[in-house]
Each structure stands twice: as structure tokens, then as C-alpha cells.
Image (cartoon, rainbow, N blue to C red):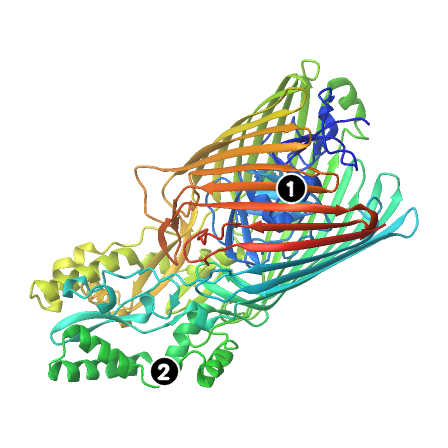
Amino acid sequence: MTKYLIIVSGFVSTGAYAQDASYVQKDTTVKILSEVTVSASRTRESLLRSPVSIQKAGEQYFRMSAAPSFYDALEHLQGVQLITPSLGFKVLNARGFANTTNVRFAQLVDGMDVASPHIGGPIANALGPSDLDVTNVEILPGVASALYGMNTVNGLANISTKNPFTSEGLSIQQKTALTHLGDANSAVKAYTETSIRWAKVISPKLAFKINGTFNQGYDWVANDHRELNGQANASTGLLGKDNPAQDPLSSYGNESSDRKTISLGGRNYVVARTGYDEKDVVDYDLRNIKADAGIYYQLKPGMTLTYLYHMALLDNVYQRANRFRLEDYLVQQHGIQFQSNSVQLKVYLNRENTGNSYNLRSMAENIDRNYKPDNLWYADYTTAFNTATGAGATVADAHRQGRIAADAGRPLPGTAAFSNSLTQLAQINNWDIGAALKVKASFIHAEGQVDLTQDLLSSLKEKAGLQILVGGDHRTYIIEPDGNYFINPKAGKEYTNIHYAKTGGFVSVTKTLLDGDLKLGAILRGDKNDYFDLMITPRFTAVYSPVNTQHFRASYQSGYRYPSIFEAYSNVNSGGVKRVGGLPAMSQGIFENAWLASSITSFQQAVLNDVNTAGLTQNQAIEKNKGLLKKNPYTYIKAEHVKSMEIGYKGIFDDGRFFIDAEAYLNKYKNFIAQANMNVPNTAVADSIPYALYNKSKQSPYRMWTNSQTEVNNYGGSLGLTYTEKGYVANANVTYAKLKMSDKEDGLEDGFNTPSWTLNVSVAKERILKHAGAGISWKWQSSYYWQSFLVNGDVDAYSTVDAQVTYLFDKINCKAKLGASNLLNKYYYSFLGGPSIGGMYYLTLTYGIR
């Protein structure tokens, strides 16, 4: 049997996968070009000679991984970060600036973007393949804008599925797992996932495939009660449980917009509404139905026309600035592709309908306000406080009695009144009085590319070593205004569909020199987005291969990210704070008249301290501290720009047994898209502005999409080492990422949200015995600072162990895989504000018939 080298996801494995491919002979020959990539340059090329960093995971990697699914296994790839807002919603990222939607990292399936239109990023693997249909995943951890345009400044993942012409038959997979063992927030729960794939060749020209997956379980629980507002009443000595303005992290309805400064007994106190824990206002039952189908028609050899359809119906928890319950959330994609040796054409439509989804924070706020408005609640609180102090109660006890009295009649979790209120508010599409998320949005995308030197100018390729690729794309977003999340800014057309479009194109030229040892590349891309000027994006690369096992590369590229439709057009009343898109059409007059919320908070706290500790009147304290107020310096949103420099090396030693993959990069960001809180006073009289900004009822708070004025830099690198011997594959990779802000940091949310160090180590073999294999992996990541509008703080370092054993029943073509992720069941948070994640213990049975 011929043995050959396969590069898989940053590790090297040798041997053709067959019944006897369980070991590697010492005389293994190396076939360098046996593995190719299509994502790095949008054309087939050697993975080893890729001009930029790329990781590729194939079927063998997924079979040997101890992760519960192929998607979970991506977390262990070199340079990849994964965060978990939900058991059914996981977010891939690379090279920093992670968040729970991650609009800087694209996810493609068979070359088609599977993003939710209004979110601007994918909902995990909702529109992706099942374990049965995935063939490989290519991940570019770095700027990919020159070739792919918007939303790829951090990279992309391209998931490829099986072709029915080459992978025919019926496959069934049943996955059963236990979760929440030892979880203080839940009893032990079962998780099940059933997948089926059927592919059939009808004729030499026509084939089809159908996939379906159904899973259900119980989501990870967010019940973190660390205090976010512990110093609100420090000037009066009310701390800890005595603080009447408590704001536990996983509790909603007691945030800044649900607090008020009230005068009691001659002193000022900050008092918050009571709110509810997340577990009280969310259904943690998780369900996901997804299906896809493909019809493949071969017009002639090497020329295929394909129709693809994907759909998913979701029930899980999703997070951005707030956490949401996705209920009956439907996403769909229709796509048509034409592909030949030189031409690729795609057109596809993504649609979403958020169904019966709702905002958890708004739900908690408005259950409270639905039974008693704020003014009445605070009046009852004040009366009860005064009665208690008059009877000799301490201040702390008087605050407790004030809350008990004000909360009289409040719906309690588990009661019919609470359930009825939750059901009603989940259908009210106004977050000032309800909680519903009612969004319908779509985008249509068309793209094409032609390899001019494949057929038309083939002599240039043969004689001059040139490859010339040209391509273009267009995308139009279609937003259906709902009156809450989106409103058309044009007067009189508030409920007319909004269109937001982008067009781009590129030219790529590659030249080989020095008898093929040196490969130079240059790409020039232009993009024109509505409301923005033409942006030019270059990429220059060089790959030097002195021998066919050693490859050095360097690249420089830049990229732009345009605002997503939420960043551009949002118009949400969210708990008393209006979140507004940064386009002039949406935010005219706000930036010009606003004051920074951070300065208002400092000003209000200083006034509170002087009233309570220095004996000043409120007006005296306002006059004394008004210099703390700062006018808003930010303005309408611009495109985000990044410049990236990268060097890398891939090398093979010891007859293909030892593989090294190393990279280092430096990114410079300008006009980093971020959010800023600012308030507009209800007066334009200069002397009255400080008084208005001390009184919450005399100002309008906004959260605006804008740009950081700081140059944001980040740098890092990764190193992967793999050794293969007699079928055993040992892999280790380490990733380093660091944020460096300039001296003129403006304090906007930068959201780097990435551990400085991440380490993965694994050992696996498909067949340790004749029918049995096993694998084990260990992951560790350092602590890091998480920054978001929900919470800021340190995420603790954590480590996890995954393990699996596999048994092959060859005679009946069945495989059993018994495994565990987080085997030791050490609960951890992958980010703040999210759930606590424990162990998952699973048994997967896979059966196939050709």
C-alpha cells in the first residue's frame, strides 16, 4: 500500500485511512501535495505553500477527537478560540476581539456565508452540516478581507460537505449524553441528537443528498451572582447585603436604568428595583431541528451545477449586549452554485425570523413594572422606610422593610401570575413595556470568480508562471422594520423595508520564480458600501520553499469592516436606554448634544458623596462637581480598518513523522467599531445642563455605535508540533495573543476578550487494537479580562480534559464512540455573563450503508 502525508488541522498524520492503516512504517514516503487548500487564495493550492496562516481539519481528525461533535473539535485547533454562550450556541474566533456574536469572523459552508442577517454572524453550526456530512474545515486565523470582503478581519472558517457523487449511501448517527452532573443549578439531564444522511447517484450526471438532525437537551445555566454595583451606597456605609442597589450579574431588572437616587431621612440613597434571576425568566430546554438538501448536476466532467438548501429551527439562549431566549427561531438559506475548472458562480439567499424569542433583561424589568410602575414602587418604598425608621429600625433594616412593602403583590417565579406575565410580555414588541424580539431580515449574495490563466490565458501560466484570478461580489440586506428593533429612518416610511448594500471586486496575481521555489502574490480589492466611500484593500504575500519539506512565508494585508445592520440601523429602546445605529440617518443630533455617561456617573456619585458626607445641599454639590461632566467627543460611524503583517513557517522532518507550524502577526486597527454610552439633557441652557444631568428624568440615555479614537494594536503568534509514529498522533499547540493600546486610550469598549495563552495537547490512535481506538486531549487557557456592556471583569483560567474510546464493528459497518468533554467535570466560565459549563458524557453510535 502507498503511504502518504496528510496535514490535518495543524497536525500531520500519515497513512491512507483503510482497514490496515493503523501504523506507519519507518520508510514512509512523503507526498507533499496530497493535501490542498482552497480558502487561503480561493483556488486549489498546496496547504504547505499557503501564503497565509491556515488550519485544516479533516475526517480523520474528527474521528480521533474526543470532542462531542466536529464543531466542538475546532476549539483545539492551533490559533482558534471558542466561547460558549449556550450549549447550542458556540462562537468561533481567532486573534482577539472576541464577542458573543463575533461579526469580525465569517463562517462559510461550501463557500456560502451562513450568517444570521440581523446579527451579522453565524449562530454556531445552526446552518452547518452534521457530523455525518462534514468532510473538512479550513480556518484562516487572520485578516481575509482582500479575498472575502466584509466581516473577515479576524478570519473565517469554511466548512466543506460531502459530494453525493463520491459519498453515496445511508448513514445514521445517534448521540446520547448526560450533562449537569454535580451542578448546583440543575439535576442531571439527558441530551440526545439524532442525525441521518442519505445520498444517491441517480445517473452519471445527477445525484442528490438529504440531511436531517434533531437534538434536545437542557442548556448550561447562568447563575453568577458576583456583584456589579457594590459601591453604589458606600458613602452611607451600606455594603454587601445591606446595599439597596444590588446588581448581581445573572440577575436582570436591577441594572442602571432600574435604579433611582432617592432622599430618605435627610440622606440620598441609590435604590434598585428587585429584579429576577436569569433562571427565573428563561426556559433552558434546548431544541434544534436542522435539515439540508442538495441536488448536483454534472453538465460535463469538471463542470457542476448545484442547488443547496439549509434550514434550522432553534430553541436556545443567545447573547449580545443582553441575553436572549431564542424560541422558534427560524433561519434558512437557498443557494445555487456553478463550478468548473476556471469559473465559480454563487448566488444565495439567507432569511431569518426570530419567532417567539425575547430579551431576558427586558422580561425581568417589565414583569416588575407590569405589576407596579416605578413611581408607585418608589413611593411605597419611601413610606415603608420612613415608618420603619420612625419605629427605631436601623437604616439597613429600614431599607429591607421598604423593599418588602414595595414588592407586595410582586409575581413570584413558579406562580400562575408570574407565568402569565412572562407569556404576555414575550409577545409585546416594545422593550419599554414588553420583551419580544420580532425581527425578520434577509440578505441576498451573489459572487463569481474566474481563473483567467486556467483556460483563456493558459500560455501565461505555462510560460511565465503566472496565475490571474478575478472576482466580484454583491450583497444586499433587506430589513423588515418591526417598530422596536429596526425602524426605517425616512420620515413617513418607518415601516418600509430598509436596504443596505455592498459591492466589491478583486484581482489576484500569483507568480512563481526560482524554478518554483519562490511564489509571490498580490491582490487588490475594492469595496463600495452604502454611506461609505470606496475602500481599497491590498494583500502582498511571499512563500519560499528551498526544499519540498520546508516553507517560509510572509504577508502584508489590510482590510475593512463595514458596520453590520445592527450597528448601522438599530433603534432599540432597551430598558430605558435607547441603542441607536451610528449612521447619520439614525443618529442625527444625538452625538452633537450628548454628554459622556461615564462622566455623568462620576458626577452623580460625587454629588451623592458631598450631600451625604460633606453636608452640602444638592444644588451646592452640583455646582461644585459640574466640572466632572464631559461633552461627547464621538461622531457618526466609520468603517473599521486593520493593517496586518504576518510571518510563518511549515516544516516536515523525520520522513514525515514530525511537523512544525509556526506563525507570528501584528495587527493595527483604526476606527475600531465600538459602543459609547452618552446622555442628552432635555435643555440647551448651559447653566441648567448639570441639573438636568443629575436628574434621570430630565435626560435621555443612549448607547451609540461609533468608533474608538484610539489606535488599537494586537500581536501574537502560535506554534504547533505534531509527531506521528505507528498510527499514534501526538499534537501540542500554543497560542499567544496580546492587546496593546496607545497612550491616548479613550476608554471605549475594546472587547479584546482573549486569553494571552492557550495550550492544547492531545494523543490519539484510531486502532490501538484491531477494532478499538482511543484519544485524550487537554486544554488550558490563562485568565483574561472580559469587557462588554453586560459586565467587565476577569475570567478565571481553566483547564479541561476530553477523552474517548472507539470500537468498530466492521462486519455491520457500525462504530461506537464513548467519550467525555470536560471529563473531570470542573465547572468553568468561558466568558463573563455566560453560563457555567460542566462535563458532557456521551455515547455515539454511527451506522452506514453503501
Local secondary structure at mark 1: strand
Local secondary structure at mark 2: loop
Classed neighbour count for the residue bearing mark 1: other residues with Cα under 10 Å, few (<14), some (14–19), many (≥20):
many
Q: As shown in the figure, which amino acid type bears the numbered disc 1? A: Ala
User: Can residue 491 be seen here?
Assistant: yes
Measured as percent of width and height from the top left, residue 650 is found at 60, 25
User: Can residue 154 be seen here?
Assistant: no
Looking at the image, which residue is at 44% across and 53% down? 829
According to the picture, the residue beneath numbered tag 2 turns out to be: 410
Measured as percent of width and height from the top left, residue 477 is found at 60, 57
According to the picture, the residue beneath numbered tag 1 turns out to be: 774
Mark number for residue 113? Answer: none
* Quadrant in the rendering for residue 388: bottom left
Q: Nearer the viewer, mark 1 or mark 2?
A: 1
Instruction: List the single residue furthest toward the right.
Output: 203
Looking at the image, which residue is at 73% across and 51% down? 132
Instruction: List the single residue furthest toward the top.
Output: 514
Classed neighbour count for the residue bearing mark 2: other residues with Cα under 10 Å, few (<14), some (14–19), many (≥20):
some
Mark 1 / mark 2, whichever is N-terminal: 2
Q: As shown in the figure, which amino acid type bears the numbered disc 2? A: Arg
Measured as percent of width and height from the top left, residue 788 is found at 40, 54
The residue closer to the viewer here, 804 or 797, is: 804
**Quadrant that contains the N terminus:** top right
Using residue 187 as the reference point, say whether residue 263 is left or right of it: left
